[in-house]
Image (tube, coloured by chain):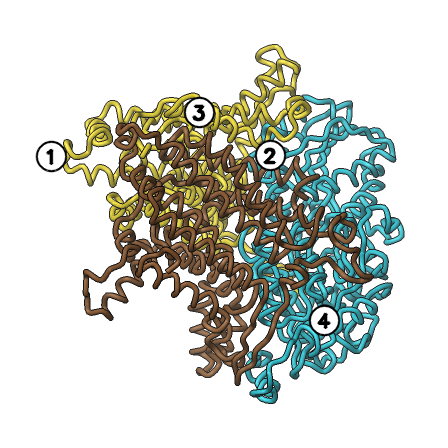
Chain colours: A cyan, B yellow, C brown
Amino acid sequence: MSILTRRGLLKSGAVMGAGMAAPTFFVNQAHAYTNAPTGGSVTLGFNVPQSGPYADEGADELRAYELAVEHLNGGGDGGMMNTFTSKALKGNGILGKKVEYVTGDTQTKADAARASARSMIEKDRAVMITGGSSSGVAVAVQALCQEAGVIFMAGLTHSNDTTGKDKKANGFRHFFNSYMSGAALAPILGANYGKDRKAYHLTADYNWGYTTEEAVRTSTEAMGWETVAAVKTPLTQTDFSSYITPVLQSDADVLVLNHYGGNMVNSLTNAVQFGLRDKLVNGKNFEIIVPLYSRLMAKGAGANVKGIFGSTNWHWSLSDEGSKAFVKSFGEKYGFPPSQAAHTTYVQAILYADACERAGTFNPCGVAEALEGFEFDGMGNGPTLYRAEDHQCFKDVLVVKGKENPTSEFDLLEIVEVTPAAQVTYDASIFGGELGACNPGA
Amino acid sequence: MELSEFIAQIVNGLDKGSAYALIALGLSLIFGTLGVVNFAHGALFMIGAFCAVTLNRILTWSHVVIDETKTDFLGNPLKVNVPYVNDWFGVETGAAIIDWSVPLAIVFSIPVMILVGIIMERGLIKHFYKRPHADQILVTFGLAIVLQEIIKFFYGANPIPIGAPAAFAGSFDFGTMFGFDPNTIIYPYWRIIYFFFAALIIGAVFAFLQFTTFGMVVRAGMADRETVGLLGINIDKRFTLMFGIAAAVAGLAGVMYAPINAPNYHMGMDFLVLSFVVVVVGGMGSLPGAVAAGFLLGILESFASMDTVLQVIPGINQVVIYLVAIIVILTMPRGLMGRKGVMEE
Amino acid sequence: MFGLNKKDTRLMWIVITMVVFAPFILNPFPETSGMAQFNAGYPDLMQRFVIFGIFAIGFNILFGLTGYLSFGHAAFLGIGSYAAIWMMKLLTMNVIPAIIVSIVVAGLISLVIGWISLRRSGIYFSILTLCFAMMAYALAYSVLTPITGGETGLQPKLNDPRIFDAPLAAGASPKANLFGLQMGATYELKLGGWLFVINAGYYIAGLLMLAAFYLSIRIFRSPFGMMLRAVKSNQQRVNYTGLNSKPYTLAAFVISGMYAGLAGGLLVAMDTQAGAERMFWTASGEVVLMTILGGVGTLIGPVLGAGFIKYMENIVSKINSKVLHEWFAFLPDGMEDFLVAVFYPFVGKGWHLTLGLLFMMIVIFLPGGLMEGGQKIADKFRNKKKNDKDDSAQAAATPAE
């Protein structure tokens, strides 16, 4: 394992230098910003779910981070650094400092995630925190990073809130959101299922579920669909039978499952069990829609996903140069294609490093300035803009469908449409919230 | 509210209730016979479901064949896994065997679960009979974590889909039998089987306790362990076996549940709190109480999830089980059928 | 001293010393050494140690003294947190109103829940408390989202009213403080290779923990405490003597609920975030485990139990394969990979496995919890002078039911 070095050795030089020096306030005088790297290395904090239902997604995020660190430090084949339009990164770490990292477990709980992030900031002196697999965690950790004065590069978080009402100047999101899912899905649904459909929504009873339901409702109603009912289901629900049978008795001909993770796997499985897909209502085939897809969830739902539409941030079967390079280096290292969570976290790590290079500093305010309004390409989703007003990325959104004849256990989704960024762009002010000013801490 | 909706929710409730009742029955059996608060009972349910997954893995044990006509995600020739059963019995018979892995897992899981139960009882639980309930909770909770982490280590955290045999796919439209429109009250075959399977197991456990000498001794031991011991009967051995049986009941509930919801490593914890609520609502020390409470809570939970109900009381589906439990415990001091003095200290 | 007997005074001094010198005790390894991974002397974890210590001390007043096992105490922690964060949003970022209101609100709610739940005993009581807490969690996560923030929880925002605070300076964000002293204010002491972190928030929480601990000693030694113990050993006998035990148990329930509220308020004061997961049954279960693990009915055991669990959660979960490789790097490659493979399942993402195994080992081999372990070691050193055992050890020897 030649890429691994002893953090202790690298740090020792700096610490020896400080030696018995008089105590200093690191709060104020010592540095211009929190955790300014002093030695020959810089530490990033990878905060991902390692226990709980999203542990596999977290494991994939961590693989992508490790790959990104390898590439940043000049190892491996460079992956998407070669296709990235910005050429600031040289493969010698970030600003000449070798990239080190620490990992932590968010447990997909806001409290645990913050505890883990604080330990990275306070103990390990991480200058950036990234990762996570739910919006609750993303919003909580983003607020913490704002307060502590470090950059937060969100992982998988799909709620409008993260860059909407809860946006923060130190936080950045590459992943798409509920609004974009709705906007991208509606035209495809209209084209495939017609414009006079009656939709029945089952919605996970928490923030992400609300924003997703609202986005899909608004965009489908705009093209003529009618919403028959929208029923909230508890997060802790495992058996959805009592929510599915009323669907059979309504005159709805489309079921929208605003569920994610285990909720989605179970509700979709149950819906198919109850024969919804074989039903004929109002002379039309009954259809099921899953607004947010991930390959891991599709795997959990097995054959039930076949033919079901949804949206996703990225998929390994994309044929652009960036995606191909990423799939190649990830696949060769780990033996299977990356998930969308892996893609978004890899990109976030590279984008952060690139912003530091371009800004010439790790200072969060400098980095934020470099990211704001930054336009780039070659990272898998076509030309992308990091919008300055809300720190949300605008890029192509994929509409996908469960594949009928998968050739392998990874080949579960097929891309139906790549919706151009322009079609999913919205006004930054519609979700409220205040970005505030960047906080360098210290 | 239409009558058909009402009936459909009762059926849902019976279906849900049968899972609750099966888990609660095993839990109550362990309470009643051994006086042990077993926080690892959910883990036994989970292990049962993973018996199905494991058997499926064994049956689909494969060797790799390279298919030159297709490519994998890296552009290399595609490697296709071919199960050995296909080689041995031909593709069609092989596929049929794999398809039937869940029913086969029932046979497979009974000895496995009894063994797991006996090892647990002899190796760990037996040392905790005289210890305070708090210690029992701590040690069985620790065990539950260890068991689920072991499963997570080997199978990952993602749910693993296991289908029911194709013969049982589809649903039964029994609404038409009662004069309702077609497609209003339909129920998947596998869930109907689950219900009857649960009824069968519950009946078998009761019959076993009621009509066999073994069961009589165990019941006597539940009532007064010391006296039975003084009569020269080796109650310990019987209790060990009872623990094995309780584990098997939980395991079977898990095996049969696998096609309904894809098993994952934390499914036991999801059911744990609920099953304790069910047992306590049923009343401590009462097996019929546990079963009755399982069905009661299943049905009420189903009603609470109806849109018409939610329109009137938003969020009732989130709390109905807890609310009912509170009301039952407050109006009936020992739950539905609890015995006096059992875990009231 | 302080109205305590000699042994309790000694215990109090030990705890005071531990709290005051925690930043040094918890950072025994030089920052540059590989062992620095095991240092726990950073503000967040130290704060959590004392806050969950308070939570467990309070829980022990109910469970250790009366034997009533509440399985829903996390509800009071969560309610205290919500009360505190709302004070910070509405009134001021000064932590004083937040902490006081969190104690009061948690006290009121625990009065209601306690009054209802204490109508039953044994496991029926446990399930009643569990049901109340799960209802609180489920509602806070879903339909109460407008007041609780639901999934994302609540944090102070720039545009909150905060009627007592001066308007924020441009670019500044609201920070929890005590009359201007920020909870995050930290002084860093470098001594050779060692780095010690002196944090304002920690000492404020630590001071409150000492007060909570002192109060718990007084309760344990008071006639009220004696009464509670009588309830535990035989409630019927107490009732037959013509005493109504309910006011006593209810008082104990409310006191422990207020401790939980204080802990919740402090969590918000140290880290301005409140969320519903704090009330999930696993959080209630955690404080039960802390108390049993440390030693039910002992004065200091629950604090040790709290420290133990939080340490595992925060330190062991951060050891990843890279760190393991660094540790064993001095070995030949094959040996290194082998040892990494052996240890890997138990650390990082496998930290739950280690936690579960340790739960089992402690309860199997140390029936009285960590306190009994400490006692056994102490006995060895004292050459088994049995008569020298203090009260807390005796309590440990007779575990609660």
Q: Is residue A177 left or right of residue C312?
A: right
Residue A270 numbered mark, or none: 2
Which is nearer the eye, C145 or C166? C166
Q: CA distance from mark 4 to mark 2?
A: 40 Å
Q: CA distance from mark 3 to mark 1?
A: 38 Å
Q: Is residue A31 left or right of residue B305?
A: right
- Of labels 4 and 2, earlier in sequence is 4
Circles 3 and 2 on the same subunit? no
Asked if marks 1 and 4 touch (Cβ < 8 Å), the reply is no
Q: Could you tell me which residue is drawn at 71 percent across and 46 percent down?
A: C90
Question: Does any portion of residue B69 appear in the rendered image?
Answer: no
User: Looking at the image, is mark 3 or mark 2 nearer the viewer?
Assistant: 3
Q: Chain of mark 1?
A: B
Q: Quadrant of residue C202?
A: bottom right
Taking A51 as reference, is A206 above or below it?
above
| Label 1 CA crowd tier, 10 Å (few <14, some 14–19, many 20+) | few
Q: Where is mark 4, residue-wise?
A: A79
Q: Chain of mark 4?
A: A
Taking C19 as reference, is B19 above or below it?
above
Q: Is residue C340 left or right of residue A16?
A: left
Q: Where is mark 1, residue-wise?
A: B230
Q: Where is mark 3, residue-wise?
A: B330
Q: Secondary structure at mark 3?
A: helix
